[in-house]
Image: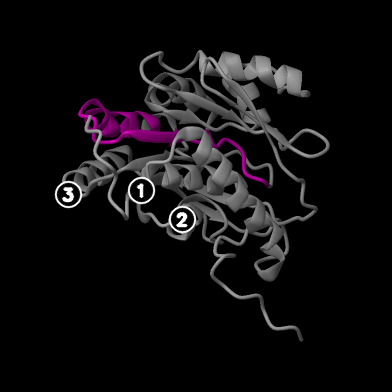
Amino acid sequence: MSNASPPSIPNALTIAGIDPSGGAGIYADLKAFSALGAYGTGVVAALTAQNTQGVTGLHGVPPPFVRLQLDTLFADVRIDAAKIGMLGTAEIAVAVAEGLAKPVAAGRLPHRVVDPVMVAKSGDTLLGREAIATLIEAILPLATMLTPNLPEAGVLLASRPPDSVREMQRVAERLRRLLPDTGQRWVLLKGGHLNGDPIDLLHDGDRMIELAGPRIETRNTHGTGCTLSAAIAALLAHGQLAEEAVRRAKAYLTEAIRRSGDLQVGSGHGPVHHFHGWWSRPAQR
């Protein structure tokens, strides 16, 4: 793989589902890419009927068409980083793994951030139980960074979620062993489900880096995991090292949550403000 500097405007890819309310999934990812200076592309793996209050339907894209989207995109467009989110079914996960195998082997896709989306903020299931084993077997080997929250970590390891930072450290080590030993691979274990200010752990098999952040009291947390993983992918595409990319992505997301009250979207778990750095605050009434 070339050591040349990445282009000034990199191309980032999201492979995920569609959330019509725009707070999560591909629409959120494209906003995060754009906010952080990456050109966004997207392959649709699933459709949802969803708003800020819940998910009322899930429709997977036929796996051959998911594969066709990937093959057609990579035949023409240079992709500097990819974020893999909600896939929905085992068959779609296999199609994604097969579609990425050749670009990965050829060194044409240096960064792959896997966000193992399984449950929506509303509690609705977004990944079939039969697909979890396929996700582990087919998708995790592609990951250069894995970004589960605590419940997702419990599912991946078939154990209860960790409930302390000490347990998070052990879980991060176990998750890192699910990834290949080749190249540099990272686990970002997100601790937002613990009480108090959240602490995330970034682990590469050697270093265990604690990343603290403030807890912002708000209901507007729809799509936070999607946004963080997409932001990391965008910053990796710019050539930033993993730790720097994660720190900057967390700072971006923290402010997006803090400014989420500027938006008026739905009456449930509202979205974060992806363009907080570019849109002025609404005028006081």
Question: SS for tag 1?
Answer: strand
Q: In terms of sequence position, does the residue under pointer 3 or pointer 2 come before the other?
A: 2
Q: Are marks 3 and 1 in contact (CB under 8 Å)?
A: no
Could you tell me which quadrant the C terminus lies in?
bottom right
Numbered label attached to residue 87:
none
Distance Cα–Cα, label 3 vs label 1:
14 Å
Q: Which of the two labelled residues, at mark 3 and mark 1, occupies the earlier sequence position? A: 1
Find disc 2 in the rendering and name its residue: 36
Task: State the quadrant of the N terminus.
Answer: top left
Look at mark 1 in the image and give the residue it sits on. Answer: 12
**Residue sitting at 55 percent across and 33 percent down?**
147
As measured in the structure, the alpha-carbon distance from the residue carrying label 1 to the one carrying label 2 is 11 Å
Residue 205, how many percent across, how many down?
52, 15
Which picture quadrant has residue 168? top right
Q: Where 269 falls versus 211 (above or below)? A: below
Confirm whether residue 24 shows in the render. yes
Q: Secondary structure at mark 2?
A: loop
On the image, the x and y values in percent for residue 108 come to 24, 35
What's the residue at 66%, 14% (across, down)?
A: 170
User: Could you tell me which secondary element the residue under label 3 belongs to?
Assistant: loop
Q: Nearer the viewer, residue 78 or 246?
A: 246
Marks 1 & 2, CB-CB < 8 Å contact: no
Task: Please report the bounds of the magenta region as a residue range.
Answer: 93-121
What percent of the width, then of the height, locates residue 279? Answer: 57, 72
Q: Name the image quarter holding residue 240.
A: top left
Q: CA distance from mark 3 to mark 2?
A: 23 Å
Q: Judge the density around disc 1: few (<14), some (14-19), many (≥20) Cα neighbours within 10 Å.
A: many
Mark 1 or mark 2, which has the lower sequence index?
A: 1
**104 in the magenta segment:** yes
Residue under numbered circle 3:
76
